[in-house]
Image: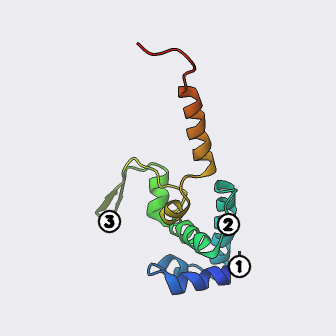
Amino acid sequence: MDPLEVGSWIITNMLDTEAWLRASDQRQTVAVVQADRNLARWYPDIELYTEIVAYQAIWELQSIDPALKYQKHNVKQVTDNGETVSYKDVERPVVAPDVRALLGATADELAELEAEEVEQRQYGGALI
């Protein structure tokens, strides 16, 4: 996917462009490549288009925020100059929320659900 095309889409279609505009050209390119690669792995049967890659690229760039890095490593509390930040025990999802809203569960998640359904099936007989 062309980073210029993704950047143009972000600028003309998104209000929250701070992470994109703050990143250098090289980081923007890497974010697009990383988003494209990850999405191709998570959604192998989906044709990726600019909007989807743009949402994920922004999500990738936002994840380099130091506060999110602390949260990813399960840091419970950070104190700096008297300011304290606490984090929930929840890890930040790797798939951008907008991507998940458009594409649904990843291929791995769907495979897990199918495996669970197979385990729960009963053949013949009845529960009493």
Q: Where's residue 30, x and y in %?
A: 67, 71
Q: Secondary structure at mark 1?
A: loop
Which numbered marker is on residue 95? Answer: none
Q: Can you say which quadrant of the picture contains the C terminus? A: top left
> Where is residue 84 drawn, in percent x and y?
30, 59
Q: Whole-Å distance between the Cαs marked 2 and 1?
A: 10 Å
**Could you say which disc has been placed on residue 36 in the image?**
2
- Identify which residue, 118 or 86, lies in the foreground: 118
Viewer-nearest residue: 49 or 60:
49
Q: Report the residue marked by disc 3.
A: 81
Q: Amino acid at mark 1?
A: Asp
| Mark closer to the chain start, 1 or 3 | 1
Q: In the picture provided, is 117 more to the left or to the right than 45?
A: left
Position of residue 50 relative to residue 110, above or below, is: below
* Mark before the other along the chain sequence, 3 or 2: 2
SS class of the residue under badge 2? helix
Q: Which residue is mark 1?
A: 2
- Which of the 4 image quadrants contains residue 24? bottom right
Q: Residue drawn at (55%, 40%), measured in percent from left and top?
A: 113
As helix, strand or loop, the secondary structure at mark 3 comes to loop
Residue 106: x and y, percent? Answer: 59, 52
Front residue of this view, candidates 75 and 40 = 40
Q: Which residue: 53% across, 67% down?
A: 59
Q: Please report the residue visible at 61 percent of the width from the left and 70 percent of the height from the top.
A: 53
Horizontal side of residue 96 vs 34, given as left or right: left
Q: Amino acid at mark 3?
A: Asn
Mark 1: few/some/many CA within 10 Å (<14, 14-19, 20+) = few
Count of number-bearing discs: 3
Q: Position of residue 29 (x, y in %)?
A: 67, 76
Question: What's the CA distance linking mark 3 and mark 2?
Answer: 39 Å
